[in-house]
Image: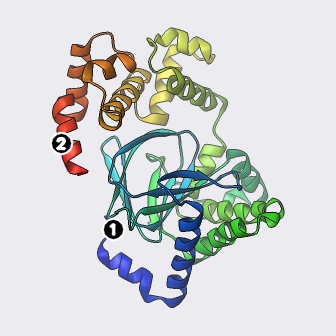
Amino acid sequence: MVSQSRYDLCMDDAALSASLLELTDILTRFAPSDGAHQTPIAPLRLIRNGARVETFQIERTPALYVAVQGLQEVRLRDERHRFGCMQCLLVSQAQPLVSRAEDVSLSRPLLLIRLDIEADSISQLIFDAAPKQLLQKPPSSGLHVEPLDQPLLEAMLRLLRLLDTPRDIAMLAPLAYKEILYRLLHGRHGHQLRDRAMANFQTHRVGQAVEWLHANYRQPLRIEELARRINLCTSSLHHRFKAMTGMSPLQYQKRLRLEEARRLMLQERVEVSVASYRVGYESPSQFSREYSRFFGTSPRNHMVALRRAIM
């Protein structure tokens, strides 16, 4: 959890305060409304959110999030991670996440930088920058929160400043991007990025299964057909899928369905039965049972509680 003292620390140091003000100005100008704003720098998106609404997303690639303003909570199964001012969240593998902005309002929205981490770029850095120097550590869930250190902050600023000089992006953005990845690769959790980049062929196949489920979660799931589609045996699919996501393919599909149904009921205000059919359930009663087991309350009661929380 990020305490208020963390915010105070951001403003105590003059250099850090100036950097924070500059980042806030850039995000305010290039992310003028709520949502994720793509920039002319392909891996870079700027996020603004003035509402305390939970969102469900599938992280398809590793990514770095940097909080410039506000506080963000991210949930992965039973894990909860919170990061705020001048802290970053490293997502080192594909997985489904639930996010919620906190300590925000329309006048003081959550401001985040999101930078996709391209596996090919990491692989090239590993080749160029002596992989033996990277620490060997056991695998983890793939989520890590830590302070944004000065070298990484300066590299991020160099990248974002290019948004004001578009003519320089083609030449200078790759250099700043490479430096950011280098800093991450040699940071506390660089081994996670290395492991992702050096993943074997079968792990790549599991990534294809994740993509297929994301695009087809409404359809009935037959494990044998999915395994055949990605050229794995069913036992390898189960083992490696769970190692990557923490869930079986069926559990993953169920989570996709239930999270999308929750979004439909909360944001589009559709009825329970309509939401259940739209995410692939044939029986509203089965949907309600599984929803209650997953969220701990019935769909209707959950909607009442969530709507009260964001009023």
Q: Residue at position x 42%, y 62% from top?
A: 110
Image spot of residue 23 (x, y percent): 56, 72
How is the structure coloured here?
A: rainbow
**Residue nearest the observer in this picture, 17 or 109:** 109
Q: Residue at position x 15%, y 34% from top?
A: 301
Cβ atoms at labels 1 and 2 below 8 Å apart: no
Instruction: Give the numbered dot on residue 2.
Output: 1
Under circle 2, the secondary element is helix
* Quarter of the view holding residue 292: top left
Residue type at mark 2: give it.
Answer: Ala
- The residues bearing labels 1 and 2 have C-alpha atoms spaced at a distance of 25 Å
In which quadrant will I find the N terminus?
bottom left
Taking 192 as reference, is 254 left or right?
left
Q: Is residue 178 above or below residue 117?
A: below
Q: Is residue 304 above or below residue 85?
A: above
Q: Residue at position x 58%, y 52% from top?
A: 37
Image spot of residue 233 (x, y percent): 56, 14
Residue type at mark 1: give it.
Answer: Val
Q: Which residue is mark 2?
A: 305
Q: Residue at position x 30%, y 72% from top?
A: 3
Q: Is residue 156 above or below residue 300?
A: below
* Quarter of the view holding residue 5: bottom left
Q: Nearer the viewer, mark 1 or mark 2?
A: 2
> Dot 2: few (<14), some (14–19), or many (≥20) neighbours within 10 Å?
few
Under circle 1, the secondary element is loop
Taking 127 as reference, is 308 left or right?
left
Image spot of residue 226 (x, y percent): 54, 14
